[in-house]
Amino acid sequence: MADELELLRGANPVPAQGPHFGDGPLDHDAERRLERLLRERPPGRPARRLLPRPGLPRLAWGLAATAVVAALAVTLVLSGPSTTPAVAAPRPLVVQTGSTPLPLDRLAERAQQAAADGSPRLRKGTHVQSWSMGMSDDKPPITLPEERLVRWRADDSHTELVVATDPRHPGRPVLSSEDGEPHLVDDGHVLSDRTYPPSWSDAPPQSPPPADPARLRAYLTEAQYTDAPLTTPELLDAVDVLLDHWTLGARETATLARLLAGTEGLRPVGQVTDRLGRRGQAYVCDGSGVRHMLIMDPVTGAVLGLESTFTTAEPEYGVKKGDVMSYSAWMR
């Protein structure tokens, strides 16, 4: 017994004599572990959860994809006796007929030209509109439209405001799931308004992205907590993570465009109008039963949005080819 107690004492991750015990600052490794824990699914299954967004780690996604995808349907329409029906699930974006696809290397050249004067500049924080599908074991899946605004302060604290809103239907009731049960709320209803204490982590994606394609690829790989080379879908997932932390400046936008131009599997397909009414050039790649569409500004090369849709049908579960799993639209 004494030997077992000694082993337990030796395994104590926070010894009393440790330099970071109590309220002391976290070291670099602890910051990264905490960031990873916050991204992972907590113990116990919630009543309703969001599907892993392209920018979030997908725990055992390769093994769980079949079970998750098979349980999804497309649209949930909720209406009451005195409310306007709210259809949350968006239709997939459609490429404009007859539009000319713009090669990524040409787009990267345009982005480089647009970055000549160095403006706009890199800014920590994000402004994003998203549509994320949620599901549970015993209820139909729903798609929740939300707008998130993150702003950082000089002391490295930051605020995060999340509201329920769908720019496709301004002023109409919006589908929400604050308490785990789907219900309608007013357009612009505040879901959360939080202030977070300072964070001094220097690990990606908290650290500023580099302005060199090779270093940016390494940065995005580290942001995905892996040492293995990223596949093209995984790289797009990492871009999602980056844009959920930073609003890129002209120089960083040009760097990202050059990186994407050197990535295999991204096919130019033509012009689209995104869900905020902006025109962009679309680039697609397929992987694991999902098609990823990247929408980029044809003049500046900035990433406007990222859409994920199913490429295979599961008719017994109501999932059709082309159903939208998630969509994010970034704004300045």
Image: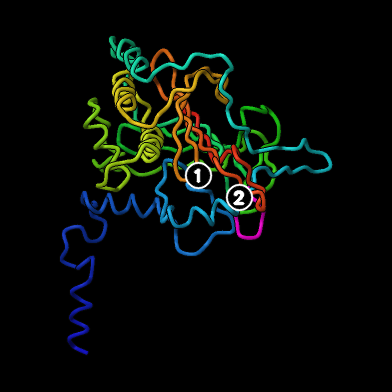
User: Which residue position holds label 1?
Assistant: 289
Q: Residue at x 70, y 36 (%)?
A: 173
Task: Tell me the tag on residue 159.
Answer: none
Q: Are marks 2 and 1 in contact (CB under 8 Å)?
A: no
- Give amino acid for label 1: Gly
Q: Residue at x 48, y 28 (%)?
A: 305
Q: Residue at x 54, y 38 (%)?
A: 309
The reply to whether residue 301 is visible in this rendering is yes
Does 88 lie within the magenta span? no
- Pick whichever, 65 or 53, lies toward us: 65
User: Which residue position holds label 2?
Assistant: 72
Does 139 lie within the magenta span? yes
Report the magenta residues as a range: 135-141
For label 2, the SS is: loop
Compared with 139, 8 (above or below) is below
Disc 2/disc 1 C-alpha distance (Å): 13 Å
Q: Locate the N terminus by quadrant.
A: bottom left
- Give amino acid for label 2: Leu
Q: Quadrant of residue 22?
A: bottom left
The residue sitting at the right extreme is 81
- Residue 179: x and y in percent read 61, 53
- Pick whichever, 299 or 313, lies toward us: 313
